[in-house]
Image (spheres, rainbow, N blue to C red):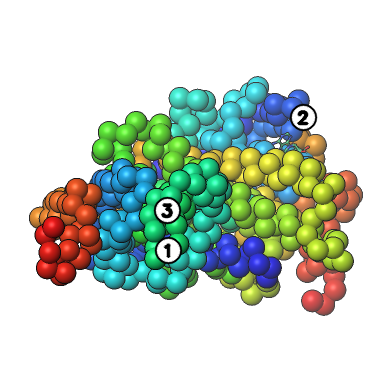
């Protein structure tokens, strides 16, 4: 099994986590979707240079990991996998914004560096929250929740299909690479010239396969409506979850708690 | 449902790229019959099955499945009474767990959860895959995947079962189990296959396709004894009929 295939199985494993039955898994999917969105909006709305004030936000993912029975190692790997994107977004900040923002001892820290780290933190938070939503809620339940939240059906279906076809695409990529490496065993990786034709082939095969899966769904009565086995009623626990976390997010956003705690412990309100 | 007859009249089908895959197919399949559909690669077997399953609508000619003529309006009804098992089980199993996959059809029928659960259990029992219920389908063996794909269709209680090369890629034991399973069904069965032993075991009737036309249609034993017909359609007599002590 090559490295890509291995990664792939891990990714699927992540998907399977949603089939558990923890306290978090039992929550109403709509509540989880709303809370996650709120969390992301709040995290994104912090000021560009905020670092310390973001830390209390980590309590939310930690809470989900704990009660949702999610293996931290797997989650971290997933987050790391998406890290290159942020690096790309934030990597130039330290060069563009060189004004001194603060001193650590006698070391001048530029605003760019701070904002870069801030982006990393915020990104880690948002991605973890999204991944945790997926790991504790089946994709179909998320789809159902979205349609209950009045998201247009066409968009919901798009999301569900995209999710399904990402798997299809990756599986086809794996097959193609395997076939290539079997026939070109002395080469490491795919040569530049072959890439073009491989990608074309891949696209055709993926479209074909996507179409067959769609047909298989039609044959079993799929008519564009999401139906799932479990029906959720909003319970007190769900409301409590939403309210408590909303209050918490707003509080963390408005009050710099670590700062405030520090001052209180040091005893001075100067 | 003794009137569950499948009837094709001069069915033609041309793919969007102008490949003429079916060139005038006419036949009648009665309720409870098991029919093997054989023929070389590219003969049009899969295309024909797609028509019976309500995936394609013929370019010309008519098809009736039970009470309905197959057309765009009746496709949902046709799909409800016909269960199609795809050639590649990976195309059929797209949900995260076996349970979800088998429940997909019944849920789309709008059945209440208890009924869905009952049907899932029953379908998995029939194919001997009840112990796999919580497994993710992509981790199953070929034979298990095949069994579960059949269950995904059985759970909709179809009148007609359609299968595209069900024994392809199975090891001998899994293949034997499949043959016994198919033999035990009372549904109308239409099975496209290269596995003439399977055809001989399961189907009393065989239709030979070549280049989108019916070359022969008759009792399986009779067809498989016609050497020139078999040669013409690039088929090989089942081992067990070749007169060797097998
Ligand atoms: N999606 C398609 N587009 C165009 N031509 C197709 C397509 N699928 C099959 N064909 C052509 O239709 C003919 C019948 O194919 P098919 O029904 O798959 O045969 P079989 O299942 O008997 O091997 C072949 O000539 C094949 O090349
Ligand atoms: Mg075929």
Look at discs 2 and 1 and give the one toward the viewer.
1
Q: In this view, does A46 lie to the left or right of B42?
A: left
In-front residue for pair A89/B81 = A89
Q: Does the rendering let one see residue A65? A: yes
Label 3 and label 2: CA atoms lie apart by 63 Å
Q: Is mark 1 within 8 Å of ligand 1?
A: no
Circles 3 and 2 on the same chain:
no
In-front residue for pair A216/B97 = B97
In-front residue for pair B202/B141 = B141
Q: Image height check: is A200 above or below B228?
A: above
Q: Name the residue under label 1.
A: A106
The label number, if any, that marks residue B19 in the structure image: 2
User: At 42% from the left edge and 53% from the top edge, which residue is drawn?
Assistant: A114
Q: Image height check: is A202 above or below A240?
A: above
Circles 2 and 1 on the same chain:
no
Instruction: Place residue A26 in its image quadrant.
Output: bottom left
Q: Is mark 2 within 8 Å of ligand 1?
A: yes
Q: Name the residue under label 3.
A: A114
User: At 40% from the left edge and 71% from the top edge, which residue is drawn?
Assistant: A72
User: At 49% from the left edge and 66% from the top edge, which residue is drawn?
Assistant: A77
Local secondary structure at mark 1: loop
**How many other residues sit within 10 Å of disc 3, few (<14), some (14-19) or many (≥20)?**
many
Circles 1 and 3 on the same chain:
yes
Label 1 and label 3: CA atoms lie apart by 16 Å
Which percent across, then down, holds residue A45? 31, 43
Which percent across, then down, holds residue A55? 30, 61
Label 2 and label 1: CA atoms lie apart by 77 Å
């Amino acid at each position: 099994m090559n490295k890509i295939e291995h990664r792939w199985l891990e990714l699927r494993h992540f998907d399977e986590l949603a089939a558990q039955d923890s306290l978090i898994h039992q929550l109403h999917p709509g509540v989880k979707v709303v809370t996650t969105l709120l969390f992301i909006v709040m995290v994104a709305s912090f000021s560009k240079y905020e670092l310390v004030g973001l830390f209390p936000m980590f309590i939310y993912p930690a809470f989900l990991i704990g009660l949702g029975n999610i293996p931290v190692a797997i989650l971290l790997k997933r987050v790391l996998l998406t890290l290159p994107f942020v690096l790309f977004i934030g990597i130039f900040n330290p060069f563009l914004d060189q004004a001194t923002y603060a001193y650590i001892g006698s070391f001048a820290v530029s605003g760019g560096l701070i904002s870069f780290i801030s982006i990393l933190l915020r990104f880690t938070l948002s991605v973890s929250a999204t991944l945790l939503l997926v790991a504790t809620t089946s994709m179909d339940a998320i789809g159902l929740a979205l349609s209950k939240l009045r998201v247009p059906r066409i968009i919901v279906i798009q999301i569900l299909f995209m999710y399904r076809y990402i798997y299809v695409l990756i599986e086809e990529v794996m097959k193609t690479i395997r076939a290539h490496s079997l026939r070109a065993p002395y080469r490491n990786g795919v040569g530049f010239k072959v890439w073009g034709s491989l990608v074309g082939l891949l696209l055709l095969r993926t479209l074909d396969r996507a179409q067959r899966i769609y047909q298989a769904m039609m044959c079993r009565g799929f008519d564009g409506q999401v139906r799932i086995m479990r029906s959720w009623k909003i319970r007190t626990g769900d409301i409590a979850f939403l309210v408590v976390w909303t209050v918490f997010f707003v509080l963390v956003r408005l009050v710099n708690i670590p700062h405030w705690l520090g001052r209180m412990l040091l005893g001075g309100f100067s | 449902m003794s009137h569950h007859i499948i009837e094709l009249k001069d069915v033609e089908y041309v793919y969007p790229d102008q490949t003429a895959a079916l060139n005038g197919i006419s036949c009648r399949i009665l309720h409870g019959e098991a029919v093997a559909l054989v023929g070389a690669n590219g003969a049009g077997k899969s295309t024909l099955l797609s028509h019976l399953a309500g995936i394609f609508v013929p370019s010309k000619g008519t098809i009736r499945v039970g009470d309905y003529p197959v057309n765009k309006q009746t496709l949902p009804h046709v799909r409800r009474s016909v269960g199609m098992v795809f050639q590649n089980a990976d195309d059929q199993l797209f949900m995260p767990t076996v349970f979800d996959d088998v429940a997909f059809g019944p849920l789309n029928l709008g059945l209440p959860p208890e009924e869905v659960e009952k049907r899932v259990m029953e379908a998995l029992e029939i194919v001997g895959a009840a112990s796999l219920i919580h497994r993710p389908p992509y981790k199953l063996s070929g034979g298990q995947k095949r069994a579960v794909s059949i269950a995904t269709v059985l759970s909709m209680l179809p009148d007609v079962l359609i299968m595209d090369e069900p024994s392809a890629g199975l090891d001998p034991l899994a293949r034997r189990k499949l043959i016994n399973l198919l033999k035990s069904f009372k549904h109308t069965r239409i099975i496209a296959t290269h596995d003439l032993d399977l055809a001989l075991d399961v189907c009393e009737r065989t239709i030979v396709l070549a280049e989108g036309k019916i070359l022969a249609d008759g009792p399986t034993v009779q067809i498989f004894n016609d050497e020139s017909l078999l040669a013409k359609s690039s088929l090989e007599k089942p081992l067990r009929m070749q007169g060797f002590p097998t």
